[in-house]
Image: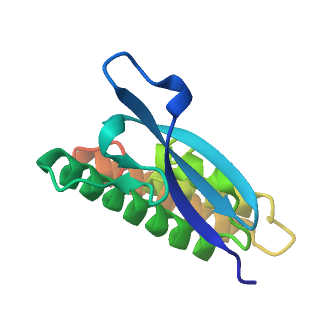
Amino acid sequence: MKSTFRILFLARWELKKENGKVPLCARITIDGERVKFSLKSEVTAKIWDPKSGRATRQTKKALQLNRYLDSIKGQMIMHYHSLSEANEVVTTSMMRDAFLGTNIKSNTLLTVFEEFNDRQEKLIDIDLAQSTFNKYDLTYRRLKEFLKVKMRKSDILLC
């Protein structure tokens, strides 16, 4: 199923500060569902173009801001593609959380292996023999020992 995906950068004019700067936020729209969040950066109101959602003048700060916005857009597109490969439906809240780094479960080798063993333990005498599970468990313990002794690490992060 194909979905519409858009990223828009907005200046929050209602929060304009005394120094003439306005805070920036991003709005992600997927199939009509919107989510808006702060980028935790500010822009001078004089150089911001609300129609294009970018800085207009050719000053050093404007070019730097536009490069920053391009990098954010690129990161969001990468998050969208990785989420769409992992899930059937990508929501705006999933995108926001992926970009902001909240709610991300870090997978490590031992945690994935332990979850696998937990699932396999439930299948003993149904689809799995006890001796097979014992081998899985032994492999987990030996891997844990190997990481500790040889690699001097408690676990390895999986990408």
Q: Nearer the viewer, residue 8 or 73?
A: 8
In the image, residue 2 above or below residue 126: below
Q: Is residue 157 at all visible to an observer of this figure?
A: no
Q: Position of residue 139 (x, y in %)?
A: 48, 62
Quarter of the image with the C terminus in it: bottom left
Choose top left, top right, bottom left or bottom right for residue 131.
Answer: bottom right
Q: Nearer the viewer, residue 89 or 116?
A: 89
On the rendered structure, is 7 left or right of 150?
right
* Residue found at the far left of this picture: 60
At x 57% / y 46%, what residue is drawn?
A: 97
On the rendered structure, is 78 left or right of 80?
left
* Residue found at the far top of this picture: 18
Q: Nearer the viewer, residue 66 or 57?
A: 57
Q: Is residue 119 at all visible to an observer of this figure?
A: yes
Choose top left, top right, bottom left or bottom right for residue 117.
Answer: bottom right
At x 55% / y 67%, what residue is drawn?
A: 80
Choose top left, top right, bottom left or bottom right for residue 153.
Answer: top left
At x 52% / y 57%, what residue is drawn?
A: 8
On the rendered structure, is 50 left or right of 153?
right
On the rendered structure, is 55 left or right of 133?
left
* Residue found at the far bottom of this picture: 1
In the image, residue 88 above or below residue 148: below
* Residue found at the far right of this picture: 126
Q: Position of residue 93 (x, y in %)?
A: 67, 49
